[in-house]
Every structure is written in C-alpha cells, then in structure tokens.
Image: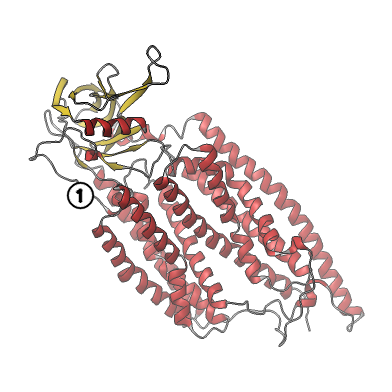
Amino acid sequence: MCVKMESKMCAQFLAILLITISGCVSQVRSSASNHKYKSNDPVPLYVNKVGPFQNPSETYRYFDLPFCMPASTQWHDKPEALGEVLNGDRLVSAPYELNFLVEKDSETVCKKKLTPQEVSKFRSAVAKDYYFQMYYDDLPLWGFLGKAEKDAKADPSETKYYLFKHLHFEILYNKDRVIEVNVRTDPNALVDLTEDKEVLADFMYTVKWKETDTPFEKRMDKYSQSSNMPHHLEIHWFSIINSCVTVLLLTGFLATILMRVLKNDFVKYAHDEETAEDQEETGWKYIHGDVFRYPKYKSVFAAALGSGSQLFAIAILVFMLALVGVFYPYNRGALFTALVVIYALTSGVAGYTAASFYCQLEGTNWVRNLLLTGSLFCGPLFLTFCFLNTVAIAYNATAALPFGTIVVIVLIWLLVTSPLLVLGGIAGKNSKAEFQAPVRTTKYPREIPPLPWYRGTLPQMAMAGFLPFSAIYIELYYIFASVWGHRIYTIYSILFIVFIILLIVTAFITVALTYFQLAAEDHAWWWRAFLCGGSTGLFIYGYCLYYYYARSDMNGFMQTSFFFGYMACICYGFFLMLGTVGFRASLFFVRHIYRSIKCE
C-alpha cells in the first residue's frame, strides 16, 4: 500500500514538473514572439523604474521623478505577469519614439521649466546615485540620471549636481529584428541642479541604427557573457575544486575513522555475545532500548520534516528549470512565478510527509499536525511580508504589492496550496506505514550520563554547520551579488554541483556527529540530528551580516529591512531543508547499525 502510494505521488510530481516547465517555457516563447518589424513600425519602449544603484530593493516608478510625460493618447501601463509584479517591475509607455530603422538627431522630447521643488527632487536622486531602467522590444537598458562633481576651483568642499538631459540610443538590427540596444548620456548636455531655483531643461534624444550579423536567437547572450568570462569561470571552478578537495579530505578522514570504529564495534559486540552473555553492554549498543524512542514535540518534528521535504522538492524542480534554460537573463519575473507555482503545487509533499511520519510516531491529532505543517514556513514568511510590504508602502516603492496581486496570492494559497496540503495529509494518514525500528524500545528511558560542554547542542551545531558552509561560501558571494545587486548569474550547472556537494557534506557530518552522540550513550538524537543538519542556515545568515557591512554599499531602513528580513526567511528555509536531509541520513544510518547487531 505504501509503495503504491509513493509511486502515485512520484507520478504526480512528474506531472507537476512537466506542467511547470511547459508553462514557463511557453511564457519565454511568448515573450520572444512577434518581434518582426518593417521600416517605420513602432517598437515598444517602456520605462520601468528608478532607484539608488546600491539599494536594489529600493526602486520607484519612473514618473515619480518629474520627467517629460508621454502624450495622454500614448500613455498606458503594460500588463504584467505575477512574477513581474513580485519583482517590482512597473512598465509604462515612454515619451520617446524609437520607430524601426528611423534615425533621429537631437529630437526634443519636451521643454520643461523645473520648479525649485522638482530641482530638489532631481538633486536628491543624483546625490543618491539613481539609475533608470527601460525595456525596448523586451531588451533591458539602463543609465544614470546625472553626476555629482567637486568644484575644485571655487570651494573643494562644495559639490555640484548635474542632470543628464540628452540620451543617445544605439540600436543594432538584423533584417527585420531588433538585436541589441544601448543607451548613453551626453556628458556635455547638463542641467545644473546645485541650487533650488527655477531651471529650464530641454530634454532631447538621438537614435542611431546599425546592422549586425548576430542572429535573433542569440540576442540575449550579451547579458550572460559577464558571468561566463574566463576569469569568472576560473573563480567558479576554483570554488568547486576547493570545495571538492576540502570535502573529500575531511569526509574521507571521517569516513575512515567511522568505518574503522564501527568495524571494531561490530567485532567487539559479536565477541561479547559469544563469550559472556551477561557481560554489561557499553557504547551505542548499551542504549539500543532507547535509541528509537520517539522524540518530544513529535507533531512539530513531523511538521518540520514535511516542510523541509517540500522545500527540498522546490529546490530540485527550480534547478531543473534553470538547467533547461528557462531563467535566462532579464526574463522578468520568471523565477518568482516559478517559485509561487511550484510552492503551491508541492504543498502535497509537505502534507504527505508530515502526516505519514506523524502517524508512524503514533500521533493521533493529525489535523492539528497538518495545520502546523502548513504554517511552519508560510507563517513566518507571511508575517515578514506584511511588515516589509508596509515599509515599501510607506516609502511608496515599487516593491509594495498592489492589492490585486495580494488577492491573487491569497487565492492561490486557498484554492491550490491548502487543498493539496490536505489531500497529501489524507494520503499520508491512510498510507498505514509503520515506523521500522530494528530493535524494541524499553518502557522506561535510561538516564543520559553527564557529558562535557562540547557535546552540547549548540557546540555540535557549530561543528556541523561549519563544514558544509565552507564548501559553499565562495559561491555565496556571486549569488548575493546577483540577488542583492546588479551582477548577472547564469552558471546554474556549477551552482547545482555546489548544491549536491552541500547535501552530501550535510548528510555525512550529521551522521558522524550522530554516531559520536550515540557512542557517548546519549540517545536523544532525533532533534539533535535535525538541528545539526540545519545549522548551515545559521552560518549563511551570519554571512549576510558580513556581506552587508563589508561587501556591499546598501544603506537605509528600507533596504536594510528587506535584506535581513527576506534573508531570514531564506535561511530559515535552508534550515528546514538541510535539517530534513541531516535527519533522514542519520535515521538511515542508525537503522543500519542496529540492524547489524544482535540486541536482546
């Protein structure tokens, strides 16, 4: 019955994967279609957002600054997918006309008299190093709003602020397709913003077209070249080789010791059984009657395993989508869309795993366990989102989700996530799987002997988390620079290898620490194995502090709260996922060693 149920679940997951991939790929294909133009055809140009370059989460609508507005007949918002809204994109028609193959020279957008308040707005933006982002035929382009200069002749301490008023667009085409677009600012066409006084600004733009041989299918390759440059690849491969060598040496050393000690234990226990049946048992065999005693708070424990299993499934599915090329650079919101859809569709994994394991532990209130499973990860994430969305609303930033988007997410949770969680829980409850303990559990637990301080939970967690973290910390910088910066990350194959190394090291170090714990006659290993496995998440959060203060220029309350708030949720997810991996590996190991000896 259990095997049959698991095969059904596997078939369901494969179907989910195919649906997700086909949906995301269709989104990619739809965005890459309808790009053929004739001479003088209008090509869609949208302005997206502006914001401080060092604060990637703090972005605002383009027209929050007093730029030239498009004509009322041309003004419209671009319809956006769920992922684009979650990404903070707010695309609006631009005041520039860049028709296909039509060149323009110093075309005037508008002549605008800036009021002192508008000058102050622009000056504040230039002082904070604001950049703008646009999309031309779904190709991204960006530039800075202005520049700040020290006036060395007059007063070295005085800073003068200038706004760029002339944009130069250079567009490359191949027959009837737009291949590449670049924008640069004219350093000589400036508006002085230093003083709060009325200023007349002539906003202009120039358009040049050039032919290229680059095929349309390769027009996005330009944006991934930065991460594929030889010196970057060398660093990534050095990271992997360094991780592999470190992991092989340390795990090989531990494996040798562990296998030799286990072999000696098996020989010793077998010899004791032949020579002296009444001889007092020692070591991990001594606690065979307590090692499979169910843990405290088993409902929470089963819920943590369920949530961790779901997050593990999400990670694997997202990696599959990345490896087949769904997440190409600047595919706006594809990753967020995939995360929302996959999380909703894999909630059955959490329900099935949690309810099945909870019933194996002879739990009775499986409905409460299911509610706990559904809220264990979603609850903290929801509270964090409510706080951060309130902050974004207060800042009037594009990171603030519109009410309609929040309603859509709530409906997905109510109509997809919750029903699948319940269905998975019912399937897990009815699986009738029994906990496979190779030895009997005694009625009364043995007393755990006093242990030295370094065998406590916190020192063991520190030891367990350091080795997996050391295997991934070099790659972490590039991931952080991509998520919390403007660097592009496209080497998903290397990231997947690092992820596999992380899983292997986490499983192995947790197994080793579990053995040493049992050898010290400490039979409370269930929660310890989970906590030790998940402790890498705490190390990653510690790395967040280092990255924020030492490797980035992020500042301000909004950016700081977004960085530490969402990274806390991500690290908590890693804690649950790696904790599940560590416990499953330890459970397999403990079952194996107690099945290999004869216990009365």
* Residue at image point 43% right, 48% down: 323
Quarter of the figure that contains the C terminus:
bottom right
Relative placement, left or right, of 244 versus 63 is right
State which quadrant residue 110 falls in.
top left
Q: Secondary structure at mark 1?
A: loop
Q: Residue lying furthest top in this view? A: 153
State which quadrant residue 484 falls in.
top left
Percent across and percent down for residue 574 are 52, 57
Relative placement, left or right, of 370 versus 209 is right
Q: Is residue 132 visible?
A: yes
Question: Where does label 1 land, which residue?
Answer: 79
Percent across and percent down for residue 91 are 23, 43
Vertical placement of residue 518 versus 470, above or below: below
Comparing 410 with 557, the one in front is 557
Q: Is residue 86 visible?
A: no
Vertical placement of residue 164 versus 90, above or below: above
Percent across and percent down for residue 280 are 87, 79
| Residue type at tag 1 | Pro
Vertical placement of residue 204 versus 526, above or below: above
Q: Residue lying furthest right in this view? A: 275
Relative placement, left or right, of 502 versus 76 is right
